[in-house]
Amino acid sequence: MTQQEFLEAIAEALDCEMELSGETILDDIDEYDSIGVLSLMSYFDELGIKVSPNDFEKFETVQDLINLAGDKIDG
Amino acid sequence: MAKLHFKNASIRGIVTTVGDKKVTIDEEASKFGYDEKLLKRVKKSMGFNSRYVVSSEDICTSDLCLASAKKLLSGCNIEAKSIDALLMVTQTPDYKAPSTAIILQDRLGCSTDTIAYDINLGCSGFINGLMSAYSLIESGLNRVLLCVGDVASKFAYEKDKNLTPLMGDAGSAILIEKSLSDSYFILHSDGSGYEHLIIPAGGCRYPCNEEALTPKERGDGSIRRDVDMYMNGAEIFNFTIKVVPKMFDELLEFAGKSKDEIDYFVLHQANRYILQNISKRIGVGSDRLPMETVSTYGNQNSASIPGTINGFLSDKYSSKKVTSLFAGFGIGLSWGACIVESKNIFAPAIEQYKI
């Protein structure tokens, strides 16, 4: 999947209408709350990527999510 | 691996009694400090709507279970004296000791020849309790009464915005009898996750003292005491999506059945969000995997599977042969599932407790 497709999938998982980019600060996304974290964990789990709830405490920007997706993003 | 196959036991009746008082999230939102946006979000994602709780501190799980048991025995037209064993699954016993099941033996009028003991489990408790009941029947008993449930109001602190709006009070009674029927159980335990759902104080390791009774603001933004239940929702969710779909595959393979042969997947009703997630992963829709119990009654702990049958599938279980897959998962951590057959059982609609 391309980075753009990944960003769209993240926005869909969070159920947010905001346009996301690598620079977007996670705390600026209204839907990035405890329910949002569950949705992202579920999304990454479906991609086959292991992530623990504690990891999310270290994440600051959407770029951290892009890094987590690693080679699942090829564009 | 704990896999069990029984051939001589089946369920004859299921009755569930919920708390006498209905509360709604709209009424409670301000108590939990929800603003309008968060309220809308928890309603939509988690399915918070209404829940049933007991109106008085005097009402215990055993009272709800006793009401269910009396209705069950009368509906099945059997005498309390004919029960060989009475098992109680709860985290809210009447006393720290003795077992509530023994007190219920007397209150229900069972004979002193009855086996009676408690099992301390929550979300997975119905599966473990049912496995214990089936095991006793398989070993020679004729009739086992299984009581399951919790009055979660006793351990969910009123200001805990994460846990309390989720919880409902309920007590179920299930009658298991000798009868030719194949059933398959798989059970798991993982104590390394014990801290993710825990009542830290009140046991021997951290006795109930003044410190334990002091309400404190916690890192997760909630207020609670150490004698109250703590839930790390994200860890529990993470655990659930990892183990539950996998367990279904194991169980179906063990039973030699396909998903299509299962009429209903009745799962522990943790919250709608988790159930939707599992439903999507296993490819079974809400017509066969009910997920609205939390929205109507709240999370009923070990009574959530019987509560869902009495709450939403009463006519189906009462009128036909049903192949069910039941699954429970949570506190412990502990998870288990079973495939059982039942036919025209006594399964009346849920009732509110009458004081």
Image (cartoon, rainbow, N blue to C red):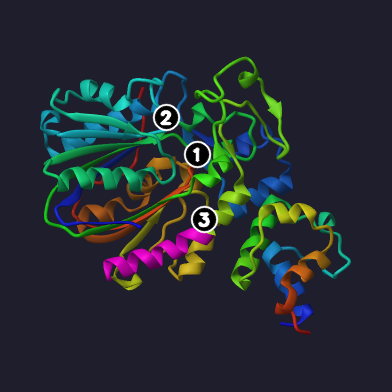
- The residue indicated by pointer 2 is B20
How crowded pointer 1 is (Cα within 10 Å; few <14, some 14-19, many 20+) is rated as many
**Image coords of residue B289 (percent x, y):** 41, 61
**Badges 1 and 2, same chain:** yes
Q: Are marks 2 and 3 in contact (CB under 8 Å)?
A: no
**Badges 2 and 3, same chain:** yes
Check the picture and name the quadrant holding the C terminus of chain A: bottom right
Pointer 2 chain: B
User: What residue is drawn where x is 16% and y is 45%?
Assistant: B137
**Image coords of residue B66 (percent x, y):** 28, 28
- Cα separation between marks 1 and 3: 23 Å
First to last magenta residue range: B242-256
Closest to the camera, between mark 1 and mark 3, is 3
Res. B240 mark: 3
Res. B51 mark: 1
**Image coords of residue A64 (percent x, y):** 80, 65
First-in-chain label (2 vs 3): 2
B336, B2: nearer the viewer: B2
Q: What element does badge 1 sit on?
A: strand
Say which amino acid is labelled 3.
Thr
